[in-house]
Amino acid sequence: MSPVARAYTPHKFRYFFDKVVDASLDVLNWLKEHHNLLWVRSKFSTEIKCDYINNNLAKSWNAWIKEHKDLPIYCLANAIREKTLTLFAKRRKIANALSPGILPTVIHQVNAGSRGLGHLKVTKGHLEEAEVTEIYKDEEVRRHVVYLPQHVYTCREWQLTGKPCSHALVVITTLRQPNMDQYVDMYYSVKKFQVAYHGIIPSITDRGQWPEVDKGFKLFPPVMKKTRPPRRQKKKGILL
Ligand SMILES: [Zn+2]
């Protein structure tokens, strides 16, 4: 299932998915019932520049608020507000100290990816267009085409992630003094990072000083079931 989810092209997706279905037909009904949402990269929109297919985000969020999870709701909300407020301020400080262009971490990542590409053969008939062939054990395995100005590579990784993949990088590195900034999507720019943390979360006083509001009803604590066993409840993460 993992290669099915990770494939970037519909072609590759189909190849692996057929293998899964061959192994068990039941998988079709199971997927229909339990995984009705989009979970394969090859079907993601290329506009969003995100190829995220795991739940690490929910996991790290839960780890981030772990110590506050058992608090009453208003304390929990306040703790999350405080954490977010501090985080925004910290990121805003970093953002303002960066020089314009693409985020240094992303440039670093792309530069690191442009090394060790000896298994890729570039055939260039045009300045900004080329064929890239993957070679394994002296055999040509796969060939794709890259169109530099359009940020398009037929393996689709570049379009989906917004960052040039190894195939695109091997072509970019054939250029004279390539400017990596122009091959990475604007989503990874310092400007977008600044905009993301631009909003200031307003400071608020403690609960004792909040305005009184008439809710129109009285809220009682939940009725506890007498049959509940007296053991500690399992900690559950907050689902995103
Ligand atoms: Zn590629």
Image (cartoon, rainbow, N blue to C red):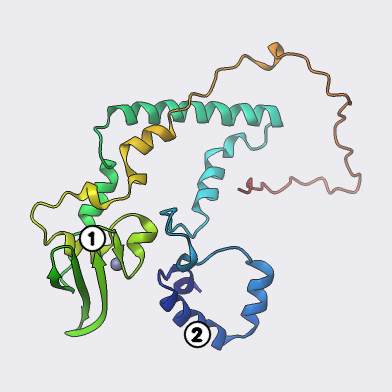
Tell me if the residue at label 1 has its CB under 8 Å from ligand 1.
no
Q: Residue furthest bottom?
A: 22
Secondary structure of residue under mark 2: helix
Residue 102 sits in which quadrant? top left
Type of residue at label 2? Lys
Looking at the image, can residue 115 be seen? Answer: no
Q: Secondary structure at mark 1?
A: loop
Which is nearer the eye, 72 or 30? Answer: 30
| Residue to which mark 1 is pinned | 148
Foreground disc of the pair 1, 2:
1
Q: Measured along the vertical axis of the image, is residue 58 above or below residue 150? A: above
x then y, percent, for residue 89: 43, 25
**Upstream in sequence: badge 1 or badge 2:** 2
- x and y, in percent, of residue 148 in the image: 23, 60
Task: Judge: label 2 CB < 8 Å from ligand 1.
Answer: no
Residue at image mark 2: 19
Pointer 1 local density, CA inside 10 Å: few below 14, some 14–19, many at least 20: some
Q: Quadrant of ligand 1?
A: bottom left
Residue 201: image x %, image y %? 52, 24
The answer to whether 177 is drawn above or below residue 66 in the figure is below
> Quick check: 202 left or right of 176?
right
In screen coordinates, is 104 left or right of 210?
left
Vertical position of residue 158 compared to residue 59: above or below: below
Q: Residue at x 54, y 20 (%)?
A: 202
Q: Is residue 145 visible?
A: yes
Instruction: Report crowding for label 2: few under 14, some 14 to 19, many 20 or more residues within 10 A (C-alpha).
Output: few
Q: Position of residue 221 (x, y in %)?
A: 85, 32
The residue sitting at 60% across, 17% down in the picture is: 204
Residue extending farthest right? 226
Tell me the distance, in whole angstroms, between the alpha carbons under discs 1 and 2: 34 Å
Tell me whether circle 1 and circle 2 mark residues in contact (CB < 8 Å).
no
Name which residue type carries label 1.
Answer: Leu
